[in-house]
Image: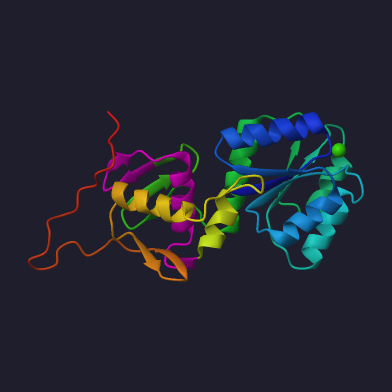
Amino acid sequence: MRVLIVEDDAMMGRATQAGLGELGFAADWVRDGVQADAAVLATRFAALVLDLGLPRLPGLDLLKRMRARGDRTPVLVLTARDAIGDRIKGLDTGADDYMIKPFDLHELAARLRALVRRANGEAAPVIVAAGVTLDPATRAVQFAGNAVELSGREFDVLRELMLAAGRVLSRDQIVERVYTAQEEVESNAIEVHVHHLRRKLAPDLIRTLRGVGYLFRREAADRDCPGGSPGRIPDGKRTP
Ligand code: CA
């Protein structure tokens, strides 16, 4: 889940980026409003963590610009403890949530997941499609009732594919959603992750549309075709 942190305080920005990274987010960090404006125009982030007091372009002005051009990216505003006026202005300008500094990283992560879930029109925190159950909070995956062990990046790719179940995602869209701007991405990286996901889950869960992208099935495959193979057993590792 790709998020943008907009924070001019270097210590705070660095710590938030590292912390969210450890919690499974692909977190980019910029230090002023103008850089942030350029970043949100170039990249579709799942959510923004926005400080209000920023050089060059204040957080509220950035938020106004985004909403004025129809950008509906969920925005969580960071404010000082005593700045009630800022929080009200932030929410009225189009922020979706706020947190007071200093904040707990786990709470920030949970609030971001909730914002993204609501933005995707999902009511339940756990994503279920085609027999796969994926919990973005615990990063646990089950297929046909069995726990499946995935690498961090395999999990990220699976989550994006499942969020888009029934729709095609291009390779570039997946890369944009699971890697930060600083990361080097091998040209076949997504192909490799999808290959591993098929091996650990089931070969027919993810379709490749040559030259277009990848499609996660919305429904479970029909497993009782006449004379066909018996029910598919996932070969992913099971947790004890
Ligand atoms: Ca600031």
Residue 84, percent across and down? 85, 39
| Number of numbered tags placed on the structure image | 0
Q: Which colour style is shown? A: rainbow
**Residue farthest to the front, as pictured:** 187
Q: Which residue is drawn at 42% across and 67% down?
A: 166
In the image, 166: left or right of 117?
Answer: left
Residue 91, percent across and down? 78, 51
**Residue farthest to the left, as pictured:** 227
Q: Which of the pair 194/226 is nearer the observer? A: 194
Ligand 1 located in image quadrant: top right
Q: Is residue 133 above or below residue 15?
A: below
Residue 223, percent across and down? 19, 61
Q: Which of the pair 50/157 is nearer the observer? A: 157
| Image-quadrant location for residue 227 | bottom left
What range is drawn magenta here?
141-169
In the image, 123: left or right of 205?
Answer: right
Q: Can residue 94 be seen in this view?
A: no
Q: Is residue 99 above or below residue 234?
A: above
152 falls in the magenta region: yes
Q: Residue at x 57, y 33 (%)?
A: 22
Which quarter of the rendered picture does the C terminus lie within? top left
Q: Which of the pair 82/237 is nearer the observer? A: 237
